[in-house]
Image (cartoon, rainbow, N blue to C red):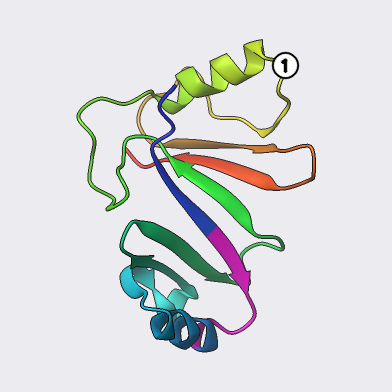
Amino acid sequence: MKLGAFSVSLSVRDINKSKSFYENLGFQVLGGDITQNWLIMKNESTVIGLFQGMFEKNILTFNPGWDQSATNLESFTDIREIQKQLKTKEIDLLTEADEASEGPASFTIEDPDGNLILFDQHR
């Protein structure tokens, strides 16, 4: 099972302060739109997302089909296949991708400690 790029999506109170803080740690903006209260930042192979007012808790995020630079991978495990495999392992899904669909989709699970994990395929 290839999960794709990994990042941590952080729920922040003030996106401008958070942006400045992470820039001081050597992160640079990779994508997003600060006027919409979200940014993706990168330092070497480490990727974080800053999201103001979009969700309550921090989220671990996997992007099937992408590498750590958000470049499309030639070969990857489709999100619907990952979802099916997790279901066979009796992992409860909080939200589900439509298994009859193709292309972009997402689903979420929660680990035993209540940490949210988002699987988010963009292609």
Query: Which residue does the numbered mark 1 point to in the structure image?
Result: 90
Q: In the picture, residue 13 is in which quadrant?
A: bottom right
Vertical arrangement, residue 47 with respect to residue 67, above or below: below
Q: Is residue 8 left or right of residue 73?
A: right
Q: Secondary structure at mark 1?
A: loop
Vertical arrangement, residue 119 with respect to residue 19, above or below: above
- Does the magenta segment cover residue 12? yes
Q: Nearer the viewer, residue 104 or 64?
A: 64
Residue drawn where x is 19% and y is 29% of the image: 74
Residue 43: x and y in percent read: 35, 67
Vertical arrangement, residue 26 with respect to residue 76, above or below: below
- Does the magenta segment cover residue 93? no
Q: Is residue 37 left or right of residue 55?
A: left
Give the magenta range. Answer: 9-16
Q: Is residue 63 left or right of residue 76?
A: right
Check the image and name the residue furthest to the top. Answer: 88
Residue 63: x and y in percent read: 41, 41
Q: Is residue 81 left or right of residue 69?
A: right
Residue drawn where x is 46% and y is 79% of the image: 22
**Mark 1: amino acid:** Glu
Vertical arrangement, residue 26 with respect to residue 41, above or below: below
Image quarter (top left, top right, bottom left or bottom right) of the N terminus:
top left
